[in-house]
Amino acid sequence: MFLVTDPETVLGRLGPEPLSNEFKTRDLQRILHHRKRILKPLLLDQAALAGLGNIYADEALHRAKLHPLRRSHTLDSAEVKALWKGIRATLRDGLRHNGASIDWVYRGGDFQNHFRVYGREGEPCPRCGTAIERMIVGQRSTYSCPYCQPWKDQSFQGQPPKEG
Ligand SMILES: [Zn+2]
């Protein structure tokens, strides 16, 4: 929460609101391709995109079938579209289960009963049944399905980098 006399001093530093009608796939594409960063920390960066917390980011990446350590500029247009849809679907889902508030803690809502990957290490992926894995990316717990979100990035040979 911010208390300022001129909202622009705060809002000017926030990225676009993903659920707004003005937010198109080309806007996401521009963010991803210009910033050239690891996907997960980029999604959490409020200066890039407003309103995505740690849980929403993992859920959106799973919906989009994208590895959390993919580098943002390596996504092709189909993957950008999938991520755009994944982010919006996740946010809408969160809103539906929480009433009107977007709350990082999800107090009072039942969204936590509907997580696809977050907090579900070792449990079956709802899409394919593979055990969900946990790793640390940018010092945050990150959950993904190794089958649905395979590592592929032309700019790295073999294994993903250790840290986001
Ligand atoms: Zn899966």
Image (cartoon, rainbow, N blue to C red):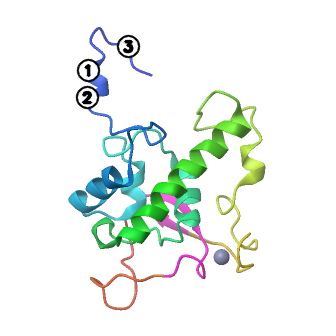
Q: CA distance from mark 2 to mark 3?
A: 14 Å
Q: Which residue is mark 3?
A: 3
Q: Is residue 141 above or below residue 97?
A: below
Q: Which mark is residue 152?
A: none
Left or right of residue 19, residue 25 in this image: left
Q: In the image, is the residue at mark 2 within 8 Å of ligand 1 by its beta carbon?
A: no
Q: Which residues are magenta?
A: 135-150
Q: Where does residue 126 sit, x and y in percent of width and height? A: 74, 69
Q: Secondary structure at mark 3?
A: loop
Q: Could you say where residue 79 lies in the image, as x and y percent from the top left?
A: 43, 69
Q: Earlier in the sequence, mark 2 or mark 3?
A: 3
Residue 21 screen position, x and y as percent:
44, 38
Q: Residue at x 48, y 45 (%)?
A: 52
* Residue labelled with disc 1: 8
- The residues tagged by marks 1 and 2 sit, at their Cα atoms, a distance apart of 5 Å
The quadrant in which the N terminus is found is top left
What kind of element bears circle 2?
A: loop
Q: Position of residue 53 (x, y in %)?
A: 51, 45
- Magenta-span inclusion, residue 146: yes
Of 164 and 153, nearer the camera is: 153
Q: Earlier in the sequence, mark 1 or mark 3?
A: 3
Q: Residues within 10 Å of mark 3 (few under 14, many from 20)?
A: few
In the image, the residue with mark 1 has its CB under 8 Å from the nearest atom of ligand 1 = no
Viewer can see residue 69: no
Q: Residue furthest left?
A: 34
Query: Which of the 4 quarters of the picture holds residue 62?
Result: bottom right
Residue corresponding to mark 2:
12
Q: Residue at x 62, y 28 (%)?
A: 101
Tell me the CA gap for discs 1 and 3: 11 Å
Q: Quadrant of residue 128?
A: bottom right
